[in-house]
Image (cartoon, rainbow, N blue to C red):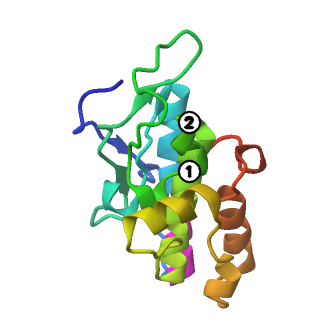
Amino acid sequence: TVSSSSLTLPGASGAGRKASARKQTYWQSVANIGRQVAEALEYAHKQGILHRDVKPSNLLLDLRGTVWVTDFGLAKVAGAGVENITPTGDILGTLRYMPPEAFEGQSDARSDVYSLGLTLYELLAMRPAFPEKERNKLIKHVANGEPVPLDKARRDVPRDLVTIVQKSVAREPARRYASA
């Protein structure tokens, strides 16, 4: 387990990219945030690190538009032969953004993809995918339910973004993107 919660990874900084002369739409801005976070998570995953707590408050956006993925306090080293010091049944992370398999003590890169998908859902729908406030109801819905499809929650989200988010938040890990 990575013990430092202050470790940060940059999203794609755009180094070498020219700033666009035209202003981005809100949808393009959210897509750009998602791309940067996915690139940062993919980098961490290739280093054998799972974040396990991707959520809006762990993403910092600087004045240049760079997204920084922060708070690796719940991160763990992934891979064969690595002892999992978190016992099955321990709930770690922020309930609202946890993948269903986390309730069984399971996680892999697709778990971080799921949490990123829920984060993007919230940015696009302008509300959480799981809006329950009462803890037990929230746990039940996150563990066993599915969010309202994004295109039903917000009809004006571009279809490509809906497709990406819906695949990212599939209940079954095998139906999600295999990597960030």
The reply, left or right, for residue 85 in relation to residue 63 is right
Say if 120 sits above or below 100 in the image: below
Q: Which quarter of the figure has residue 167? A: bottom right
Q: Is residue 32 magenta?
A: yes
Pointers 1 and 2 in contact (C-beta within 8 Å):
yes
Q: In the image as oriented, which residue stretches furthest toward the top?
A: 81
The disc placed on residue 171 is: none
Residue for point 57% across, 34% down: 106
Q: CA distance from mark 1 to mark 2?
A: 8 Å
Report the magenta stretch's main SS.
helix
Q: Identify residue for label 2.
A: 107
The quarter of the image holding the N terminus is: top left
Q: Identify residue for label 1.
A: 99
Q: x and y percent of residue 95 in the render?
A: 42, 56
Say if 84 sits above or below 121 in the image: above
Q: In the image as oriented, which residue stretches furthest toward the front?
A: 136
Residue type, mark 1 in image: Pro
Q: x and y percent of residue 87 in the render?
A: 43, 27
Q: Is residue 113 visible?
A: yes
- The residues colored magenta run 26-33
Say if 91 sits above or below 131 in the image: above
Q: Which quarter of the figure has residue 96? A: bottom left
Q: Which quarter of the figure has residue 9? A: top left
Callout 2 environment at 10 Å: few (<14), some (14 to 19), or many (20+)? Answer: many
Residue for point 53% across, 67% down: 120
